[in-house]
Image: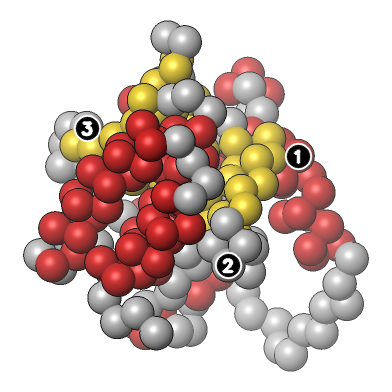
Amino acid sequence: MPKTLAEDLDVLLAVFDGKLNSRIVEKLRTIRGKLVTLWYKGLVKSNHSVMEFVLASYFLLRGFNIEVEKSLENNLVCDIYAEKDGLSYIVEIETGFVPPSNAIDPVNYRRAREISKIARYSKYSDLFALATPPYHILQIPEELVVSPGKRDLEKLLEMKQLLDQYYKSPPISVRDLLEAKVDYVYIVDVDHLKIIEIKAEDYVKNICKKSILSTRVYKLVDIR
């Protein structure tokens, strides 16, 4: 089994090399080089970078110009920045990881993290997406997939209160939440090299909500 990111990406490149045209493969080699360099510096994780590499192949196949780990501003670096037909796209990958320090608040941690990604990054592109593996359900609030004029201020304030528990420097404002947007969700199946593209509002309606509504909930104690 591969032991390093370089070996992981070489396995994928060997598959792509026989199935994609040489121009795309050459671009993937360049992307591989950048990701491996960052990995050796301890700036990226293998599981995240492999998903990034698979997503990069998807966008290249669709004719996009892309850059991985692109610097924006205010020390922000986005995972994938893509352009095509005058439109810009940013994709942020969320693997579902929860650090040990958040062992007793994993859902709030994930929810705050995913809201913060939408609020911080979506302003830098025409379209914004989150990407995740099939085994993780993104915690996307319904308010962030409807137009700003339809957003409930009380719910935005609740989001702001949650975010303030995790992100204080710099803080995320209510205006950031009012203007934030997420357009698509990409489900990245690395095992089978498949990408599923879903409109964000459909993801919230058919996956986020149904995952709760169609399940029996057993509450152990009342927590307020």
What is the distance, in whole Å, between disc 3 and disc 1 at their CAs?
Answer: 29 Å
What is the distance, in whole Å, between disc 1 and disc 2 at their CAs?
Answer: 24 Å
The residue tagged 1 is: 202
Disc 2 is placed on an element classified as loop
Crowding at dot 3, Cα within 10 Å, few <14 / some 14-19 / many 20+, comes out as few
**Is residue 213 something one can see in this rendering?**
yes
What is the distance, in whole Å, between disc 3 and disc 2 at their CAs?
Answer: 31 Å
Please provide percent x and percent y for residue 78.
Answer: 30, 41
The residue tagged 2 is: 191
In the picture, residue 120 is in which quadrant? top left
Disc 1 is placed on an element classified as helix
Determine whether 22 is above or below 191 in the image.
above
Please provide percent x and percent y for residue 109.
Answer: 45, 66
Determine whether 203 is above or below 50 in the image.
above
Please provide percent x and percent y for residue 146.
Answer: 66, 28
Labels 3 & 1 near each other (Cβ < 8 A): no
Which image quarter is the C terminus in? bottom right
The residue tagged 3 is: 72
Q: Residue at x 48, y 84 (%)?
A: 104
Q: Earlier in the sequence, mark 3 or mark 2?
A: 3
Q: Residue at x 60, y 43 (%)?
A: 185
